[in-house]
Image (cartoon, rainbow, N blue to C red):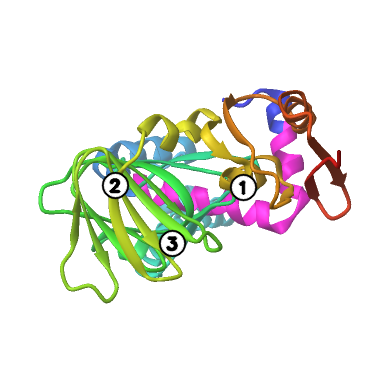
């Protein structure tokens, strides 16, 4: 369904680096794997054989070819056709057997300012936030619906009786039976947060005997430094704001939001400790320069400098 221009851009992107090529073909493998079962059910081998026989001039009767009219060239042609069919069938069988048996990893990864939406093998939908990585194994998926997350994602899980869905992070696993929830689990963040929009999840924390059950509207907050947790209510519009590419300030300081700003703009924010500026605003489609200009307009005491080479923005307080 690609247009000519879209096709040109896709080819250029694939040629740009090997990682792009590997990613594209990993998607292809996943697609083939997911559709193999339905393809097998829908195929009519007898009909396809009839079509093939007509194309190459083979009769479908038992007495196919009178020996007196069979030239060596024609014989070789038929032999080659039969070998191709046999080899193609063997190769396809080998290929699908390999998919079914080999532990193939599918990885979805985003960079600064990017989001990615994917449909998992069971029909569940995941939206991946910037600087995140989602990994799952096709081989393991046959036994259990399970993904590994580093970063942030919104999951909309398809319910299946007696088939839980698992999201695995560094310190805990989330067990789901069908629900919508947001998981924030970046490697360098001091806290992980699991927020339930609707449904029910159980969180299995390493070193804690009993699983924690969350209710809609609950945020499970895990402190990565102290390895402790708490449950509290947090506004869903703030938790899910990134789904609409928004950053919501509701009395938050720049320090509170600096990690989110870094993932959004691709610059590290260094904020002076004396700059305690609370904001109430929603950042949507503003560029970096527009955002910094807006900060200076609402806080005249603020000054900034941009280090383009090191991708750093320094925010300081002006001297009186």
Dot 2 falls on a residue whose secondary structure is strand
Of residue 271 and residue 96, the one placed in the foreground of this image is 271
Q: Residue furthest front?
A: 320
Above or below, 185 relative to 124: below
Taking the spot 53% from the left edge, 40% from the top edge, the residue there is 116
Q: Which residues are magenta?
A: 8-35
Tell me, for residue 95, which label it has, or none: 3
Q: Residue furthest left?
A: 162
Q: Residue 175, located in which quarter of the rendered image?
A: bottom left
Taking the spot 32% from the left edge, 42% from the top edge, the residue there is 39
Of circles 1 and 3, which is in front?
Answer: 1
Q: Is residue 209 visible?
A: yes
- Residue at which label 2 appears: 232
Where does residue 250 sit, x and y in percent of width and height?
50, 31
| Lower position in the chain sequence, tag 3 or tag 2 | 3
- Residue at which label 1 appears: 255
């Amino acid at each position: 369904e690609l247009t000519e221009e879209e096709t040109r851009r896709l080819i250029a992107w694939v040629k740009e680096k090997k990682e792009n090529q590997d990613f594209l073909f990993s998607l292809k493998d996943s697609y083939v794997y997911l559709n193999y079962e339905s393809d097998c059910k829908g195929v009519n081998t007898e009909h396809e054989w009839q079509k093939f026989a007509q194309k190459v001039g083979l009769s479908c009767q038992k007495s196919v070819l009178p020996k007196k009219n069979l030239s060596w060239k024609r014989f070789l042609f038929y032999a080659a056709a039969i070998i191709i069919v046999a080899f193609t069938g063997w190769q396809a069988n080998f290929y699908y057997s390999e998919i079914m048996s080999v532990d193939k990893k599918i990885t979805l990864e985003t960079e600064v300012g990017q989001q990615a939406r994917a449909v998992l093998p069971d029909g569940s939908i995941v939206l991946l936030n910037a600087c995140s990585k989602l990994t799952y194994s096709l081989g393991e998926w046959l036994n259990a619906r399970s993904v590994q997350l580093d970063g942030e994602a919104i999951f909309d899980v398809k319910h299946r009786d007696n088939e839980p869905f698992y999201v695995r992070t560094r310190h805990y696993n989330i067990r789901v039976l069908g629900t919508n929830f947001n998981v924030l689990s970046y490697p360098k963040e001091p806290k992980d947060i699991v927020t339930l929009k609707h449904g029910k999840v159980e969180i299995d924390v390493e070193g804690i005997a009993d699983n924690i059950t969350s209710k809609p509207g609950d945020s499970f907050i895990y402190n990565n430094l102290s390895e402790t947790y708490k449950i509290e209510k947090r506004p869903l519009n703030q938790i899910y704001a990134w789904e609409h590419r928004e950053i919501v300030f509701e009395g938050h300081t720049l320090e509170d939001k600096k990690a989110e700003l870094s993932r959004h703009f691709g610059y590290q924010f260094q904020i002076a400790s004396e700059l305690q500026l609370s904001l109430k605003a929603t950042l949507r489609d503003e560029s970096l320069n527009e955002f910094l200009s807006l900060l200076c307009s609402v806080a005249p005491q603020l000054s900034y400098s941009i280090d383009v080479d090191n991708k750093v923005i320094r925010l300081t307080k002006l001297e009186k």
